[in-house]
Image (spheres, rainbow, N blue to C red):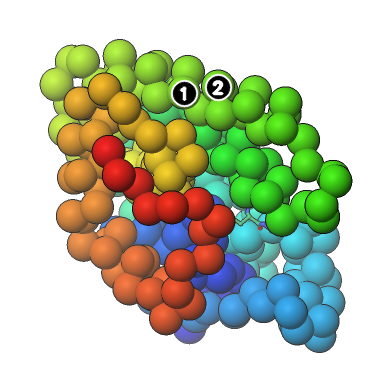
Amino acid sequence: MSLILWSHPYAGYGQKASVALYELDLPFGLKLVDAGDEAVMAAFRAVSPLAKMPTLVDTAAGKTIYESSIVIEYLDRLAGGGRLIPADPEAALEARWIDRIIDTYVGGPMNRIVLGKFRPEGQHDAFGAAQDAQVIATAWDLLEARLADGRTWGAGDTFTLADCAAAPILTYARRLVPFGDRPRLKAWHGRLMARPSFRRALEDAAPFGDLMPAPPAED
Ligand SMILES: N[C@@H](CCC(=O)N[C@@H](CS)C(=O)NCC(=O)O)C(=O)O
């Protein structure tokens, strides 16, 4: 097996890569990133100096790929191209744009809010967390408006990079900032939840329990 994914099944960005692997039907081996195991973490840092999941190693090509979006670009090309990154340049631009919005204005602030919850007593940053929540709410508005053209998936009528990003990140982030009265966003997320590739990623995560320091989404 030439593809090795350094990840944790519960990690949102890790799921983003595994959704892509499942969509493209590419076999891979998981190297479990266990933050509590110093030997594993030392090995992970040797492969990936920033120690960010996912990190993909293609042993056949002798390549290590960092950053989930770049991992997906690489995997799509490996699988023949034109699926998760559409062949049409305009459609590809839209997929990358949605992916950037989700990564920068949902996933980034979400991870800061979550990490903030694990800070020691007296070290919390309520002002920063409120600002991050506002950024996520603005991203929800942007996505709701973008979905107004009736598209089925994040960037059009086929499942792309945009959906690989959205499936896990929306699932976690809506627990911090509810979708509220944004029916198109809610309906898109419903379709993502039913997608077999994401269901597999959720099944991979299930044995680890619910590690998210926020109540389940109610809206
Ligand atoms: N922009 C990065 C974000 C990756 C990221 O933040 N991954 C999280 C897991 S969801 C992580 O590795 N966290 C561990 C840490 O920051 O120490 C990507 O797209 O790959």
Q: In this figure, which residue is indicated by the disc labeled 2?
A: 134
SS at mark 2 in the image: helix
Q: Which amino acid does the dot numbered 1 rest on?
A: Ala
Which mark identifies residue 22?
Answer: none
SS at mark 1 in the image: helix
Left/right placement of residue 172 relative to residue 13 reads left
Is the Cβ of the residue at disc 1 closer than 8 Å to that at disc 2? yes
The quarter holding residue 160 reads top left
- Whole-percent x, y for residue 125 in the image: 77, 35
Q: In this figure, which residue is indicated by the disc labeled 1?
A: 137
Observer-nearest of 58 and 157: 157
- Whole-percent x, y for residue 132 in the image: 62, 28
Q: Which amino acid does the dot numbered 2 rest on?
A: Gln
Q: Is mark 1 within 8 Å of ligand 1?
A: no
Left/right placement of residue 63 relative to residue 147 reads right
Q: Quadrant of the C terminus?
A: top left
